[in-house]
Amino acid sequence: MEKYLQSCNTEFWKNVFKAELDYILRELNGFKDVLSVGCGPAIIEACLAEHSFNITGLDISKEALDQAPDKIRTLTGPAENMPFKDCSFDAVIYVASLQFIENYKESIKQTDRVLEPSGKLLVMLLNPQSRFLKEKVNNPASYVSRIKHTNLTEMEKTIAEYFSVQTEYFLGIRDKEILESENPDLASLYVIKGKKRH
């Protein structure tokens, strides 16, 4: 965890988080009570809290949540069995976390349950097709090497069972440069935006 937090403080990762944060802020405009699933040490979530969102972070790792700032409500628990009442949130986000959850299908089912009827889902998936991710997957020191699910089509299909979806590629990375790109070879993220079907 310490090593991960150190790398998060590099200029490159700060720029990545800033681009992700700006994107999330645009998408969550008008929403208030946000659940972030698999939030880890809650770096982006801390910034969202500064923008007046009520943030709840859920993660299976107590060690990661111990690093989260106090202004964020955190709970340790599995995404497949969320410890929340029905319709508890008006938005749920997964920031590069869904692919690391063992049973992501159950997690999406739970997401549907805890979201209000007019709620929004925002899923940022790592794009295994991108050059950036291809490098990371083969590096055992990178957390990306622990990815469990890489079939984005299957994941999108699962989400579409509960949500009407829109998708786009986002966050181009070439070497250490961040650029606007929807080219699947360069875009490090595949974003799925969902509205509840019922």
Image (cartoon, helix red, strand yellow):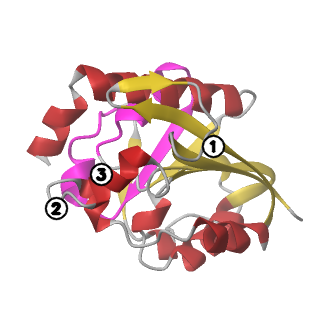
Q: Nearer the viewer, mark 3 or mark 1?
A: 3
Label 3, residues with CA under 10 Å away: few <14, some 14-19, many ≥20: few
The magenta-colored residue range is 41-70
Residue 169: image tag: 1
Label 2, residues with CA under 10 Å away: few <14, some 14-19, many ≥20: few
Q: Is residue 8 left or right of residue 163?
A: left
Q: Residue at x 55, y 64 (%)?
A: 84
Give the CA separation, mark 3 to mark 1: 18 Å
Which residue in the structure is indicated by mark 2? 140
Which of disc 1 and disc 3 is earlier in sequence? 3
Q: Residue at x 29, y 52 (%)?
A: 136
Task: Check disc 2 and report its element: helix, strand or loop.
Answer: loop
Relative to 77, say whether 184 is above or below. above
Give the CA separation, mark 2 to mark 1: 26 Å
The three-letter code of the residue at mark 2 reads Pro
Q: Are marks 3 and 2 in contact (CB under 8 Å)?
A: no
